[in-house]
Amino acid sequence: MSLLYILVAAAGIGLLILVHEFGHFIVAKLSNVRVENFSIGFGPEIAGFTRGETRYSLRVVPLGGYVKMLGDEPGDTSADADRAFLSQGFATKTGIIVAGPAANILLSLVLFAVVFRVGISFPAARIGDVSYGSAAYYADLRTGDRIVRIDGRRDIDFRDLIVKTALADPGQSINLIIERDGRTFEKTLQPAFIPELGRSEIGVGPYQSLKIEDFVKLLPAAEPEKRQKDETIESPANQAGVPKGSRIVAINGEKVASWYNFRRKLTENGLRKFRLTVADDKEAPDGGEKTFEITPVRSPAPLLGINPLITTRVKKVEKGSLAEAMGLAAGDVITALGDAKTADLGALQHEISMHLNNLPPLEILRKSKTLQLPWTKQPSSAGAFLSACEPEVLPRVAHILPNSPADVIGLAAGDEITAIDGKDVGTFADIRKHLSDSSGDSISVKWRRNGRDRAASFEPAFVGIMPGTELVMRKAGLAGACTMGARKAWDFATQVYLLLKKLVSGQKGIGKNLLGPVSIATVSYQFAQKSLIQFAFFLAIISVNLGIVNMLPIPILDGGHLAIFTVEKIKGKPLAASTQAAIQYVGLAVILATFLLITYQDIMRFFQ
């Protein structure tokens, strides 16, 4: 890690704290409330000075800060009572308390406006890879589709799509306007909630560009305990001298239209040496081009590129599960959900996700009899329900990954794999094992289609190029930048609200999406490495989050103080000092427990 970027990240987080505390400070000063201490951080003082009646200090632990005002604790008495915080009227105290979060929100507006005035790039709202069996797959979204609107919202980027789907409630639909080949049409999808992730997804990745973002190394095929320390296979492209950040132009003199087109050409080329032409400057298509000779190496972990056919025949039902409570048993075949037929597990999972809020009965076939099984309760997600039912996995193709070896050699959905590298295949697990055990430059594949045997082979090549993501620039004049900045601030404030609402409602796994101090520090460092504008954008997000969260009615937080003042205003008298102390202790316990939980999650992320 670079000390420079660590200092930049720390300075950025320190700025947010400084602005927050300055909000309290300046309004207190303007209200003639005596400020005794203005501190950035907690713990022992590192440095400080006194000016007038206020001590300004920097402390050891830079994870917060505070403004100490005269008489700001219950039971505190002073000869200068008129200038004590708790002696002030409701409006004055409210103004001082709200000023901190308001300062953070104002800072976020300023930072967002600056970012959009200078210009910032976001991942384009364009579909890359589509996961088989996902909501996007069943909605027929395709690689290259451009998203014009999300729920009526224009001027969106790929992050907007991810956040919109991530925060969707189970069973909630989102509406997309898609542009494909010059035509626009509408698609309505229901994101699938993933309890393990605590969020919903539609199963799409960002559209990859022809820019070479980085080079990747590959672990050898041997078991981890048998590998030598730091043993990896270097990227052949990197070894050939291809510059990082350059743009792919052609392979063997043939122009490349897209990353996906390039990926297919690599698969077709196999282990043969090829010429890769790249350009450093996209503004000079004929100038700045260089050609490199690359010799791929055999991948030690070859993949065929197929999804297996997983039937709806239940092999085993987990005890105590919802499936068992409904009456599902080993040997049952789930044939439909209501009127929707379910040919395979993917279709069943999709139908359950689509009807999660109003599930029709399951139709099953049991010993030649058709039965209806009503739901005893609503599952948290389709995946959570089906995870209790061990399905039957066949060595047959359900889906071909585009541009994969399976796609190139001509495999198709419905084909039955019968042999890999001369070894018979009885189960889908055999396919993986035989691929892993293969050692020759070429791997043969045999399959059966409509009763006829077919065969072909492919070379599992590794080149080691990591593509960039297609970006879109957001830049405007002063008025437009302010408008875009205000909209982004509103977006992130809304996201905080939705996340908090899910936490309060007890939605399973949602807490996994919370970032604690470890993650915030890590992400701060990563954004500091990117660019000053990207870092400013990140600080704007954290600042608006800080402003919103601090207004929660939790004791110790600004919102907790405001709640107490509101109760006192309604009662017409202050709460007893013992009551306020008890409230503060409860609030401290809640904050500490939450802090420890989120910090634990932060740390565990590094081991996943």
Image (cartoon, rainbow, N blue to C red):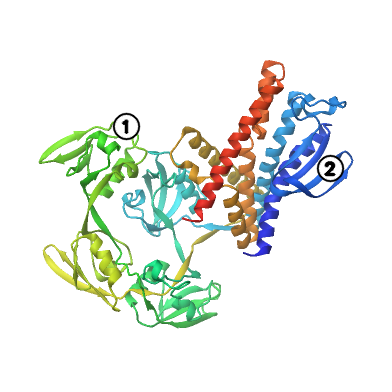
Horizontally, is 240 left or right of 63 in the view? left
Tell me where residue 329 appears, x and y as whole percent.
20, 40
Residue most extreme to the top: 572
- Number of callouts in the render? 2
**Dot 2: element:** strand
- Whether residue 360 appears in this view of the structure is no
Q: Is residue 101 above or below residue 289?
A: above
Q: Which amino acid does label 2 sit on?
A: Arg
Q: Alpha-carbon distance for marks 1 and 2?
A: 60 Å
**Dot 1: element:** loop
Horizontally, is 193 left or right of 75 in the view? left
- The residue that appears at 50% across and 37% down in the rendered structure is 503
Tell me where residue 83 appears, x and y as whole percent.
84, 28
Q: Is residue 334 above or below residue 13?
A: above
Horizontally, is 180 left or right of 432 in the view? right
Q: Mark 1 points at which residue?
A: 377
- The residue that appears at 28% across and 69% down in the rendered structure is 435
Q: Is 34 in front, or is 285?
A: 34
Q: Is residue 539 above or below residue 428?
A: above
Q: What residue type is labelled 1?
A: Lys
